[in-house]
Amino acid sequence: MMPTPVARQAQEWGLPVETPRKCRAESFIERLATIDADLYLVAAYGQILPQTLLDQPKYGSINVHGSLLPRWRGAAPVQRAIMAGDKESGVTLMRMDAGLDTGDMIAKSAVAISDEMTAGELYESLASLGGQMVEEWLPKLLRGEYPQEKQDDESVTLAAKVTTADGQLTLDESATETYNRFRGVTPVPGAWLQSETVGRIKVKELQLRKSSPSNLAPGTIVCVRPNLEVAWKEGFLDMKSVQPEGKRAMSGSDFANGARLRTGDRLL
C-alpha cells in the first residue's frame, strides 16, 4: 500500500492524515469533529460522505467536481464525458449534501475537449483547473461568502463507474463511437478487443480515420503497413500500438507480421 500524493505532501508538512476504511464510522466522524474546521474541501473521494460529517464545518463542505454539473454526476465524470463524445467539460465547485453530487453549485469553469484527448489528459487538465479555482475561491469560502445555485434536475446525466468491461472495443459501435470509447478508458482501465484469430489484445494507441462507407465488412483488415488498419462501421481504425496477451506492447504492423495477418483477413 502506497500513500497518495496528497497524503505524502501532508506528511512532509507535518499535517495529520486520516485514511478511514469507511468514512461513516462513528469513531472517524467524532474524531473529525474535534478539529472544529471552518471548511471541508473534497476532491475525487470514492465514498459518499454522511450528512452528519458534511454539517460539521462552520462554512460547509465543498466538492471540486470534474464536470459541468448537472451533467455527469457520479463516479466517472471524466471518462464518461469522453466516451459520450462531449466537446466540453470543466470543474464545478459545489456545496455538498448527502446525495450523489446533488448539492448547490458555487462556480463553474469550462475546458474544451479536443478530438484526440484521452481521459488521462482531460483529468490532468481538470486537476490543474480545479486547483486554480480553489485558490481563487478559498478566501470567499472561508468567510462563507459564496453564491449557491440549485442544479437543474431535468438536465442530469449519471456517470457510472467505469469497469474493465467498458474498455472492450466491438463492432457494435461505429468507428467514431469506438474511438471515443478508447479515449475514455485510456490510460485506465484500458482498451481491448477480442480477436477472432489471435485472442485478446490490449489496444494502446488508436487513430480514427473517417471515410465514406467501405465495401469491406467491419472487422476486416484493410492493410498492415504502415499501420494495422481495420474497417469499422462508418470509418477505419488504425491500430498503431497493441499488446497481445503475455507479450510486450508493439506496433500494429509488427503484431500483424508476427501473427501472419494479411489484407483481407478478419481481425474481429
Image (cartoon, grey):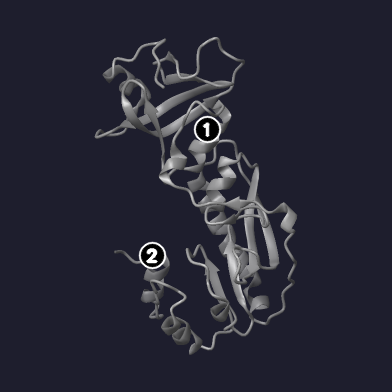
Image position of 113 (left or right of 148): left
Which quadrant is the N terminus positioned in? Answer: bottom left
In percent of width and height, residue 141 lies at 65, 76
Inter-mark Cα distance, 1 to 2: 31 Å
Q: Residue at x 54, y 69 (%)?
A: 42
Image position of 35 (left or right of 15): right
Q: Which residue is mark 1?
A: 179
Is residue 91 depicted above or below 198 in this figure?
below
Q: Mark 1: which amino acid?
A: Tyr
Q: Secondary structure at mark 2?
A: loop
Image quadrant of residue 54? Answer: bottom right
Q: Which residue is mark 2?
A: 4
In percent of width and height, residue 238 lies at 46, 24
In percent of width and height, residue 267 lies at 39, 20
Q: Residue at x 49, y 65 (%)?
A: 45
Viewer-side residue, 113 vs 65: 65
Q: Secondary structure at mark 1?
A: helix
| Mark 1 surroundings within 10 Å by alpha-carbon count, few (fewer than 14), some (14 through 19), many (20 or more) | many
View extreme (left): residue: 246
Q: Nearer the viewer, mark 1 or mark 2?
A: 1
